[in-house]
Image (spheres, rainbow, N blue to C red):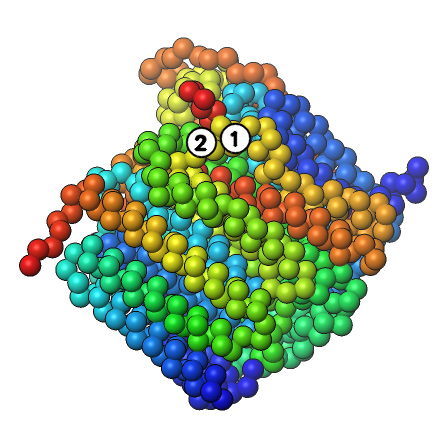
Amino acid sequence: METMTGLTGLFDVFLSAGLLWLAWQALASTDLFRAIVLFISFGLLMALAWARLGAPDIALAEAAIGAGLTGALLLSALARLPRDVPAGDAGCRTAFVVRVLAWLATMGLASTLAWVVFHLQPVAPGPGNAVIEQLEASGVGNPVTAVLLNFRGYDTLLEMAVLLLALLGVWSLGVEAEQQVTGADPVLDGLARLLLPLLILVAAYLLWVGAHAPGGAFQAGSVLGAAGVLLLLAGWRLRAAMSSAWMRAVLVAGPAAFVAMAVTTLLIEGRLLEFPQAQAGMLIFVLEACATLSIGATLAALYLGGIPQAEDDA
Amino acid sequence: MLTDVLTVVLSLAGCAFFLAGTLGLLRFPDVFTRLHALTKADNLGLGLVVAGLALQADSWAIVGKLLLIWLLVMLAGASVANLVSRRALDKGLPVWKR
Amino acid sequence: MDGLVTQLPWAIILILLPLAAGMACFVAPRIAGALGLLSVVAVLLATLGLGLQLASAGVYRHSIGGWGAPLGIELYADGLSLLMLGITALVGIGVSLYAGAYFTREQAGRFWPVWLFLLAALNGLFLVDDVFNLYVCLELIGLSAVSLTALAGTTAALAGAMRYLLATLLGSLLYLLGVALLYHTFGTVDISLLAGRVTPLPALWAALGLMGAGLILKTALFPFHFWLPAAHGSAPAPVSAVLSALVVKGSFYILLRLWIELYAPAGGQSAGLLFGVLGSAAVLWGSIQALRQARLKLMVAYSTVAQIGYLFLAFPLGGAAGYAWQGALYLLVSHALAKSAMFLAAGNLLRFGGHERIAHLDRVVQRLPLTVGAFAMAGVSIMGLPPSGGFIGKWLLLQTALSQGQWMLALVMVLGSVLAAAYVFRVLGHAFTAAAVPHDPIAVPLRMEWAAVLLAAGSIVLGLLAVPLFTLAGIGGFAGMGASLP
Amino acid sequence: MTAADLYALAGVGLVGLGLYALIVHAHLLRKILAINVTGSGIFLVLVGLSGTGPDAIPQAMVITGIVVAVSATALALALMLRLTALSGQAELPQDPDDAH
């Protein structure tokens, strides 16, 4: 990226400043609801920053997961916090000395880091060129998808395990998912019915397009997850479906497909996750399709927050 | 050239509506008037920006996508405005009277 | 047959098998107990297979996807990996035996998938040569450890788990920031490649400083131990055993690798002194706190803080001649066995008496002789008395300190042992005397007693295995491990 | 200075802000927000330092990081809710040993 000039340079300066300002406002706000809303706006600005940095894949992931689903999780957690729990007054109860020391320590760290980052001189070039050179052999045309699913697919295998593990952790608290108390709102219900097919279509599109353009399993999965959240919000009785053994199978489909693919490639090619070049594109697509389903289901289940129980009155 | 000028004009007009909507959000006295300012202005503002951008599009597919974005935002805006106002009425939030 | 054993990709089995088993346990909770135990046994066998493989063919390397570093990720196993994998499998067996009887049916359905994921993540951590993949492993370990802690369900356990989660997330983030600086300075995240490229640059020191800070937070080195006692002291007993024996050692292992492969070769030294000071403080503070605790499991948890301190005493000694690294690793391994035995024994006492107040242990030695025996044997290793594994480790460290004229460090080591003796005997003393308030004992399954005994006996037997163990750990020549012993 | 450098520096600033907030705030929801802000800052550093043109490897790492972050956030929020339900406050006990 060349040196900043003109209007875009000004835009970058405003955007960076805006990021810092929003983060500070979100963290310093005395009202928790306000803090979360500001944090969501912060996430959206982050998505804009990713677009400016030439990283549209991250921009999509950030908008869908970082701002959207994290925001939904935060708001739903806030709604479930008992009313009588004190909101805390943005750190004012922390002793003044502690705050001063913390401020000095973190600002010292940040200044040192800023100096290091500013003076960073690469000793050796990264493997960025190798990604482009080997792109042909990876089976997909989008470099980021190639790294995520092929060159560093093993990271993604473990990452799928992390996502499933978060759900296992939430369920290990032994809390049952709450009964839906509010009656379904007709407008929300209508919106859900209208958007559901569209969201599924968008997810399928993102999954498909990820092979050669920005998109992929994580973006598609988070759109599916958002569809799940919307249905839960609209009061659809998903909990019975989510408590079934089928649901568990869908939840593990992504990581299980990765493990199965790892074993298969090991048996056939002799190496973990080494795809035969001719079939690489197809195999990666199968992996991504399974991952998309799992990610969507897991994110929706995380939003539900507790262990889904079969409905008593169903 | 003419399309470029049109794009700038339409986008600027859109921005003006956004600005008006934001001002309304900040300055209007109660939930309902704020919603009024926000949804009306944003829908039209976004529509103008989308129209401006559509003039720059290379293909009809992109124009279609832009239109879809506009429609979806209007749909979401209208629904959410409805939800917010219904909740505000349920909670008995005061309606502003002159 | 011999060819088959040395040909099979044991390292990969060690990662994928527990992962797959964990998912199977999640889908079919009914068979979780049997399946889980079976797969932990399989992990032990695979570790043996890897040992044979390394012994016959030397270090193991596997380019995932066939790309090779820096584009792809490499698996790497040497003697040090083997040592860590071996101790993980052994403690894993003990804990799994115990857990089979400890948890209710409902709890077991939640325990096994997470525990198997944790096992897979630990194995993955010991086997990968890539600092970014290590970050993902660290997150997997952190989240599973927190989930297991929360399994106890009490307010104390949830508060402990929450504090632990915040600490472990902060540690991972600091580590990740270091990884970012390393990648952009040296153009790779592969440890072997980095080792060939490091030069003393501000960015290197900043990166290693951040990663080191994150890792000592996760290892709970004084004064970053603030989260450990609450989490380890309130988790279910088998979980406390895993946390103290294995989880804190995972981050220590990365720290050791980075030190030997990147920090020391680039000419770094000053952090050794810092680690020495913090380690000494940990030994003294942890031991004194352990002595002051009224609750048994908190005492054992503070003892972990102290024993972690010992591991860090090797850093100021490791640069010069001596056996500091060997001593630290021997301590690490014997502490893993002894501490898991101690937590399991503490769990038995808690189950038996319904409480864990040290002062009110009511002549348990007559009712639970095996458990008290296990506690005593583990105590011998923690104190560092011969012929235990703890003795060999402390002796090597002490000898190195004395030969280098580091009197202060030597004094700290001896003081730590004396204090350890004090807190272990305090428990044993109460176990032999009648309590003021007698109670109705609850039966403890024999399996839970034997699990503790096996692990404790292992920590003693280790004292007799020094030569073969160091030969194995020396494969690949990590930090001159293969050198003959004094 | 390039635009990427600017975003990397903004990332460093976010790390500072997040760490400060993590230390001084007592409310767990704020601590969780602080962790997320710190994470975003680190992601910006990771991508912003790719000097010459976009590099797919750090971008893929950030996507991994975002998924890990949402997983950790979900677990943290669930723990917070459970702890609050039991103890009546959304804060950690001041002294770790108070919990016993």
Corner quadrant of residue C183: bottom right
In the picture, measured across the screen, residue C194 lies left or right of residue A56, that is right
Residue drawn at x 77%, y 44% is A263
Vertical relation: A250 (above or below) C211: above
The amino acid at mark 2 is Arg
Dots 1 and 2 on the same chain: yes
Residue drawn at x 49%, y 39% is A301
Residue nearer the viewer, C150 or A59: A59
The amino acid at mark 1 is Ala
Q: Residues within 10 Å of mark 2 (few under 14, many from 20)?
A: some
Q: Secondary structure at mark 1?
A: helix
Residue nearer the viewer, C257 or B41: B41
Q: Residues within 10 Å of mark 1 (few under 14, many from 20)?
A: some
In the picture, measured across the screen, residue C10 lies left or right of residue D37, that is right
Residue C327 image point, x, y percent: 64, 50
Residue placed under numbered mark 2 in the picture: A237
Residue A265 image point, x, y percent: 80, 48
The chain letter under disc 1 is A
Vertical relation: C474 (above or below) C296: below
Q: Which mark is residue A241?
A: 1
Residue C267 image point, x, y percent: 62, 73
Q: Mark 1 touching mark 2, by CB under 8 A?
A: yes
Q: Which mark is residue A115?
A: none
Corner quadrant of residue A101: bottom left
Give how far apart the Cα atoms at labels 1 and 2 are: 8 Å
Q: Quadrant of the N terminus of chain C?
A: top right
Residue A136 image point, x, y percent: 77, 67
Corner quadrant of residue A131: bottom right
